Image (tube, helix red, strand yellow):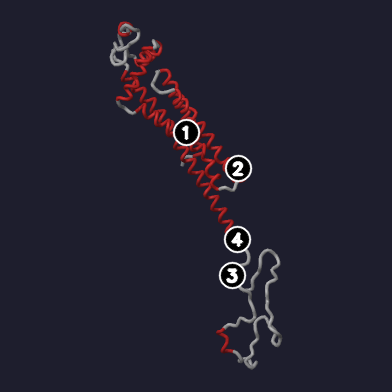
Amino acid sequence: MVNLALAYPLLLLASIAVAIYVQVTSGSLSLPLSIGTTVLAIILPFIAVANVFYTPLLHRFLQSRTRSLATQQLLPIALQVIQGILEVVLATLFAQGFVPGKLLECSLEGNWQRLYSAKDDQALQRIQDSFNCCGLRSTRDRDFPRTHQCLTTYPSRTTSCLEPWLAAEQRTAGLGFAAVVVVGVLQLIHLALFRLRNSGGARARLGYRRLTQSVGADPNEGLLENQIIDEEDGPAAGRDGTNGSRREYGTLEDGANHRIEPTGLGEESNNWR
């Protein structure tokens, strides 16, 4: 069985490394992934680490300072809820980058057109050099150098850049999606373990309260008095030659009947049975 204490930090570190790779790749290849999305993917594992330490500490603090059960349960998961919402948003944005379709091609073409219109020749050249291609949909489609000089400058480049650029976008977005999902799964495991520990502690405290309440005198139990006579022994009266008179429990033979009661000293009462 894999030790969770060792696997948890390793998986978080791997998620951070993958998120950084996604950020660097997206920036160098001018992929249509927003900087905010990739930066939040890097920050997300640190939020998860903060939750691991923050949630138990806040829970213990609230237990010692407040008696409201709702407050003890709701406040510790506030940051967990924020992390969960962030994971859903990031996963959705990354999913749009690797699901094939016209929308993805239009996003790439719009990004290429933006670079071409802004005359960002360095970005276009990095894309063409990375995939050894020219232009977007064809070797003469908005290629660099301009005026269709790409094939003249690089005669070995006979393919356009759309397909390899699309594959790079899907691969990078898929890695970002995987990093977010890993953090989300770790969060669910942490919440499950945290809930099990708290529920176990709550059951133990409840059992302790029940045990302490059960210690002491039972108010439903009566006192033992010498007037209680077993009905089954009634017919046997007078066999000992006492003319039908019988010696009662707790009395002298010829004396008056006395009632025996516990003293009630101390916190617990010892009842006669």
Mark 2, residue position: 61
Q: Amino acid at mark 2?
A: Phe
* Residue mark closest to the camera, 3 vs 4: 3
Nearer to the camera, 25 or 62: 62
**CB atoms at circles 3 and 4 under 8 Å apart?**
no
**CB atoms at circles 1 and 3 under 8 Å apart?**
no
Mark 4 burial class by Cα count in 10 Å: few <14, some 14-19, many 20+: few
Q: CA distance from mark 2 to mark 4?
A: 27 Å
**Total numbered labels:** 4
Q: In the structure shown, which secondary structural element does the residue marked by tag 3 occupy?
A: loop
Q: Earlier in the sequence, mark 2 or mark 4?
A: 2
Q: In the structure shown, which secondary structural element does the residue marked by tag 1 occupy?
A: helix
Q: CA distance from mark 1 to mark 2?
A: 29 Å
Mark 3, residue position: 220
The quadrant the C terminus occupies is: bottom right
For image coordinates 60% across by 71% down, the residue present is: 221
Q: Amino acid at mark 1?
A: Leu
Nearer to the camera, 60 or 3: 60
Mark 1, residue position: 11
Q: CA distance from mark 2 to mark 3?
A: 41 Å
Q: CA distance from mark 3 to mark 4?
A: 15 Å
Quick check: 241 left or right of 95? right
Q: Earlier in the sequence, mark 3 or mark 4?
A: 4
Above or below, 131 against 238 in this view is: above
**Residue 30 place in picture, x, y as percent:** 40, 18
Mark 4, residue position: 213
Nearer to the camera, 124 or 239: 124
**Residue 270 place in picture, x, y as percent:** 65, 69
* Residue mark closest to the camera, 1 vs 3: 3
